[in-house]
Image (cartoon, coloured by chain):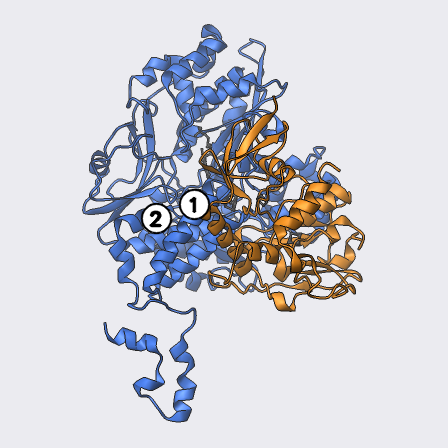
């Protein structure tokens, strides 16, 4: 007999080695997430995917599925708290969605809509961060970085490079690139790299492609992020 | 510089040594120069970003030059209680350098640092990593003169660096005199399995705070199907108010190393590490000498006691990061990386150092294990309470006549401890450090034990002249400063807590702010990745629970105070309109007038 867990009362099968996130996504159950993409080693840092496993909070993207686990996902408490965690990500950086090229394609924004986030709730930090437009084809707007490390992992695990790393401690966490000048133009990144396309927010953008898809026709303009994630990420799984 | 770096790297091109290499570069050049990063990247074959990531993580590394004398003053609440603020002002004046800055001539830099583990003999500091104790004005005069004359540290008077043990109440462990090698011979005599049985019988639980049963941890590790295993002693001791591990390593290092060696025999480890917090650099040479002597005496190294038993211990120094006390962050740091806690499972007992099964234990846990190996489990289990066997060594500081080290059987009441150390007029006690809880004067009958008040050993006493909110403010700043920044709830949450506390302490809080504060506390506590974030709100939560009026009294009687002064912003308009009547002011001021 195959092993199962339950998520909000629904029985879900899993295979040995799968995380709760893997099992859920395969079964068509969406658990909000930002720092996780199935093609890379889970990071477990954004904490948006927090679920209650047998009464304890765990990160679904890193926590192994084990036979008989009773997982809670869509409770009011978890949804409310995920919203607050998302609000934390907003106030920590500078996210002016209406003026961001990523609007409508941004996972941070889409998760916020999904969680019914209507305000920032917390005071804004207004950090002083830079824009690195030095590279001919790729740019980084540090104002929008949420430290998910997807670009770090994509560069290492898919591109076989080491273009990015997260440096600093605490609230001073920041993204650095692999060049003595500290500028993207002096790294070996290519616009075709996976790392240049993985950013869930508008922090890493490809130049001269802006607004090619008009606002109103973008990924999350007509579909919620849960539906998009289940359609696209599940397909990618096990590729 | 090329040669210097080549020299310290030597033939050992393993990136695991990065932290230790950077320590030496920082010590020599007072920063990590760009050329060093470039060279290390080549020598160790790691990307430069990895090196920068490490440099920017640890408080003691810098990408820009610090002074030839890097002066750091401890920011523990106990230092503040001993007049740190005044001293720091005096120091700034004397040296002509502001906190956080390097003097224009590059000779000296001054900054704050998290608790240096000298709470029984503060105000304390560090100069080029070496502990300074009992700072006062005359000491500062001396230090300023020595720095201005640019005297090497070796020529500074030794009393500036004097660190006392201050053991006031020894008990089962502190009184124990073990002949060198006694625990090792006992293991050989009794047998390895049988020794684990004794550890199990003793009921020993980890002394670092979490209280996991030591025998079970060792057994889990020993059962892993791996050729290599590691035994690690956690001497990071970063919890403000804790300094007992410093004393244990100064007074009883042999027994601690012996405990590690017993552990190694049981789990099958050939290599061990002592992870020593950078603040205890003053112990480094002494501990190395003890290890050398143990090797010479056949108690460490290869073929221990001629029994074909191999085990050695390497000392690794930290570089200023409280999070490295968390066991998986400690392992990352041992591997030469930033101390970011790992995802669990897997736990260190299955995948620890370099992915191999690893036991991490507190200094005191190993000390107890050595005693148990010699005396048997009953010796230990006969003392303490049902669920908490043996004794606990406390670091007592704050408002009392005799701050220092005290050892008690578990189950001792707070009242007894306060009496013994000469504490009068006590308002409350912070048990277990900032991550523990604040106990009010209504609770002094409570007991130290895992089943009541668990503690890693920090015990800070506050008398009635103290302001609790100052303490909470200090602790909250500490967590925000020490958060590793990996996970959202702690990275952003501890900074939000800090902002919120600033707002309340400065009198800008409004009634809604306490509710918001508590809500935020719960979020940080329930969603953070590791113990740091999970306990970072404890200072607020435990005092809010006991003294709600204290917080309320700082709040204005209005329901919302904006981040900026709305009424103030209207001042120009009022002047231009030549009005100053009530109608020209905003409603929040009217609300205040009803007070
Ligand atoms: C933020 C943080 C800091 C810690 N600091 C220490 C420390 O300085 N020393 C220590 O022994 N344990 C510390 N711990 C606990 C360790 O993670 C671990 O539980 C302990 O070293 C295990 O040893 P024990 O079983 O002997 O207590 C810390 C935990 C956290 C979350
Ligand atoms: S730049 Fe984008 S992908 Fe990289 S860490 Fe920041 S948010 Fe994540
Ligand atoms: S709780 Fe804090 S210290 Fe722990 S992983 Fe998260 S950010 Fe780092
Ligand atoms: S998706 Fe699991 S922690 Fe970010």
Residue beneath the point at 39% across and 18% down: B371
Q: Which chain is blue?
A: B
Circle 2: element type: helix
Q: Which chain is orange?
A: A
Residue with the mark numbered 2: B541
> Which of the 4 image quadrants contains residue A181?
bottom right
Q: Left or right: A202 with respect to A111?
A: right
Quadrant location of the C terminus of chain B in the rendered image: bottom left
In the picture, residue B440 is in which quadrant?
A: top left
A14 up-or-down from A46: above or below? above
Q: Position of residue B589 (x, y in %)?
A: 31, 76
Q: Residues within 10 Å of mark 1 (few under 14, many from 20)?
A: many
Residue in the picture at 43% in, 72% down: B564
As measured in the structure, the alpha-carbon distance from the residue carrying label 1 to the one carrying label 2 is: 10 Å
Q: Chain of mark 1?
A: B
* Mark 2 chain: B
| A137 vs A178, nearest the viewer | A137
Q: Position of residue B584 (x, y in %)?
A: 35, 86
Which of the labelled discs sits on residue B525, or is there none?
1
- The answer to whether residue B296 of the structure is visible from this angle is no
Q: Could you tell me if the residues under marks 1 and 2 are in contact, i.e. CB atoms within 8 Å?
A: yes
> Does residue B333 appear to the left or right of A205 in the view shown?
left
Q: Secondary structure at mark 1?
A: helix
Q: Can you give x and y, in whole percent of width and height, for residue B55 in the image? A: 61, 48
Residue A149 placement (x, y as % from top left): 64, 48
């Amino acid at each position: 007999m195959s092993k199962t867990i339950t998520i909000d009362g629904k029985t879900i099968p899993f295979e040995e080695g799968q995380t709760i996130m893997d099992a859920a996504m395969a079964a068509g159950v969406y658990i909000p997430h930002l720092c996780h993409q199935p093609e890379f080693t889970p990071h477990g840092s954004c904490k948006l995917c927090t679920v209650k496993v047998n009464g304890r909070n765990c990160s679904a993207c890193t926590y192994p599925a084990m036979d008989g686990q009773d997982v809670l996902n869509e409770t009011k408490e978890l949804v409310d708290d995920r919203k607050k965690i998302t609000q934390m990500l907003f106030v920590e950086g500078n996210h002016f969605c209406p003026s961001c090229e990523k609007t409508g394609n941004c996972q941070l924004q889409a998760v916020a809509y999904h969680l019914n986030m209507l305000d920032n709730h917390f005071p804004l930090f207004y950090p002083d961060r830079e824009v690195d437009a030095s590279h001919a084809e790729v740019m980084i707007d540090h104002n929008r970085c949420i430290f998910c490390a997807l670009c770090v992992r994509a560069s290492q695990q898919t591109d076989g490079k080491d273009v990015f790393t997260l440096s600093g401690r605490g609230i001073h966490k920041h993204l650095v690139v692999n060049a003595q000048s500290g500028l993207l133009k002096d790294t070996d990144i290519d616009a075709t790299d996976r790392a240049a396309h993985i950013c869930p927010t508008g922090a890493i953008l490809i130049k001269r492609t802006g607004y090619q898809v008009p606002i109103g026709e973008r990924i999350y303009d007509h579909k919620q992020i849960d539906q998009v994630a289940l359609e696209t990420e599940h397909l990618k799984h096990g590729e | 510089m090329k040669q210097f770096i080549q020299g310290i790297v030597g033939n050992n091109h393993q990136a695991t040594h990065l932290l230790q290499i950077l320590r030496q570069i920082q010590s020599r050049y007072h920063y990590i120069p760009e050329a060093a990063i470039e060279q290390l990247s080549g020598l160790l074959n790691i990307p430069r970003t990895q090196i920068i990531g490490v440099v920017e993580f640890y408080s003691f590394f810098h990408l820009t030059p610090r002074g030839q004398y890097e002066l750091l003053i401890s920011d523990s609440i106990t230092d503040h209680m001993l007049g740190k603020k005044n001293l720091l002002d005096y120091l700034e004046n004397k040296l002509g350098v502001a906190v956080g800055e390097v003097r224009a001539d590059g000779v000296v830099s001054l900054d704050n640092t998290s608790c240096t583990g000298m709470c029984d003999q503060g105000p304390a500091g560090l100069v080029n990593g070496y502990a300074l104790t009992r700072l006062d004005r005359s000491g500062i005069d001396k230090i300023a003169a020595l720095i201005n004359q640019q005297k090497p540290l070796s020529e500074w008077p030794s009393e500036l660096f004097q660190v006392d043990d201050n053991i006031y109440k020894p008990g089962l462990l502190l009184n124990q005199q073990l002949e060198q090698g006694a625990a090792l011979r006992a293991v050989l005599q009794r047998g390895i399995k049988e020794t684990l049985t004794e550890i199990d019988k003793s009921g020993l639980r980890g002394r670092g705070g979490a209280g996991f049963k030591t025998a079970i941890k060792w057994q889990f590790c020993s059962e892993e199907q791996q050729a290599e295993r590691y035994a690690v002693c956690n001497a990071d001791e970063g919890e403000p108010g804790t300094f007992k591990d410093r004393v244990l390593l100064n007074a009883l290092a042999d027994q601690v190393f012996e405990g590690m060696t017993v552990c190694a025999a049981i789990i099958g480890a050939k290599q061990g590490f002592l992870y020593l917090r950078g603040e205890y650099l003053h112990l480094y040479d002494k501990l190395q000498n003890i290890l050398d002597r143990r090797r010479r005496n056949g108690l460490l190294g290869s073929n221990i006691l001629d029994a074909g038993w191999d085990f050695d211990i390497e000392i690794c120094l930290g570089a200023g990061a409280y999070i490295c006390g968390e066991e998986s962050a400690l392992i990352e740091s041992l591997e030469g990386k930033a101390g970011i806690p790992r995802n669990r499972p897997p736990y260190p007992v299955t995948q620890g150092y370099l992915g191999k099964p690893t036991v991490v234990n507190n200094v005191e846990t190993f000390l107890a294990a050595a005693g148990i190996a010699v005396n048997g489990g009953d010796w230990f289990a006969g003392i303490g309470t049902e669920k908490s066997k043996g004794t606990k060594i406390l670091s007592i500081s704050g408002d009392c006549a005799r701050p220092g080290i005290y050892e008690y059987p578990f189950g001792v009441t707070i009242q007894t401890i306060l009496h013994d150390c000469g504490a009068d007029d006590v308002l409350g006690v912070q048990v277990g450090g900032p991550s523990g809880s604040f106990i009010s004067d209504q609770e002094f009958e409570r007991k130290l034990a895992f089943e009541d008040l668990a503690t890693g050993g920090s015990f800070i006493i506050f008398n009635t002249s103290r302001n609790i909110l100052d303490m909470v403010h200090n602790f909250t700043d500490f967590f925000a400063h020490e958060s590793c920044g990996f996970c959202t709830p702690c990275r952003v949450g501890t900074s939000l807590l800090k902002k919120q506390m600033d707002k309340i302490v400065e009198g800008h809080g409004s009634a809604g702010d306490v509710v918001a504060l508590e809500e935020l506390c719960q979020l940080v506590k329930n969603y953070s990745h590791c113990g740091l974030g999970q306990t970072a709100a404890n200072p607020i939560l435990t005092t809010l629970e006991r003294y709600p009026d204290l917080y309320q009294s700082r709040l204005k009687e209005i329901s919302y105070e904006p981040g900026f002064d709305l009424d103030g912003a209207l001042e120009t308009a009022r002047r231009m309109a030549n009005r100053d009547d009530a109608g020209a002011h905003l409603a929040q001021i009217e609300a205040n007038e009803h007070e």
